[in-house]
Image (spheres, rainbow, N blue to C red):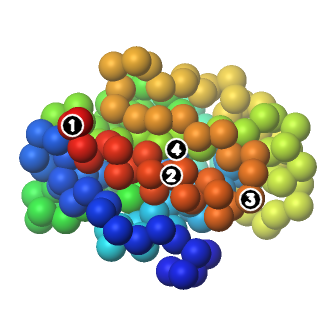
Amino acid sequence: MTAEQTVPGDMPRSSPSGPPLQVVVMGVSGTGKTSVASAVAEAGDYDFVEGDVHHPRANVEKMSAGIPLTDEDRKPWLEILAGLLAEHREQGRAAVLACSALKRSYRDILRGDAPVDATFFLHIDLPYDVLLDRMEKREHFMPASLLQSQFDTLERLDDDEHGAVLDADEPLVDVVERAIAAVRAAGHTD
């Protein structure tokens, strides 16, 4: 995705409550979180954070062996990512994080003590069979055999969470355009 394919413009630099807006592009593996998150970050001139690169080595080894992560495995990783988002807030910088954020409790860790509307969760959603096909064709440390465990863990956004769900079963450029529109709307209170 290039800058010419994104929709630049009035991307919000802060949340309605004032702190810099932190966007978490979430969903199960294979949905295109990284592609969408990096394009949204580019369109808004936000910092981009790839969550997967912050996994401890033990987590990567476990997933590579086809063993699902537990809440205990994920907690240190989520705390690292929460620290990065908090650092961005403290420095007055907006960021977009690509992270599965599958459970409400994980999203609560990422949000930290920031106001609810200071973190916007953008859930990229696709059907299991589409994702399985994608995962079988890509090179990644997480094998397709773990996809079902991610679906089993996934808790959809609750009504009181600041976020939106995007059906991503269309061309990437269209998903990115709708993601940018959702982030724009997140920064406005009208």
Tell me which residue sits at (50%, 80%) in the image.
3
Q: CA distance from mark 3 to mark 1?
A: 29 Å
User: Looking at the image, is mark 2 or mark 1 nearer the viewer?
Assistant: 1
Crowdedness near tag 2: few (<14), some (14–19) or many (≥20) residues, C-alpha within 10 Å = many
Q: Amino acid at mark 4?
A: Met
Crowdedness near tag 1: few (<14), some (14–19) or many (≥20) residues, C-alpha within 10 Å = few
Q: Position of residue 147 (x, y in %)?
A: 76, 39
Secondary structure of residue under mark 1 = loop
User: Circle 1 sits on which residue?
Assistant: 189
Secondary structure of residue under mark 4 = strand
Seen as rendered, the residue at the extreme front is 190
Tell me which residue sits at (68%, 46%) in the image.
168
User: Circle 2 sits on which residue?
Assistant: 179
Q: CA distance from mark 1 to mark 4?
A: 23 Å
Q: Which of disc 1 and disc 3 is earlier in sequence? A: 3
Tell me which residue sits at (29%, 51%) in the image.
22
User: Looking at the image, is mark 2 or mark 4 nearer the viewer?
Assistant: 2
Q: Is residue 167 above or below residue 30?
A: above
Q: Position of residue 58 (x, y in %)?
A: 56, 53
Q: Amino acid at mark 3?
A: Pro
Mark on residue 26?
Answer: 4
Mark on residue 28?
Answer: none
User: Circle 3 sits on which residue?
Assistant: 171
Q: CA distance from mark 3 to mark 4?
A: 18 Å
Q: Which of disc 4 and disc 3 is earlier in sequence? A: 4
Q: Is residue 117 above or below residue 85?
A: above
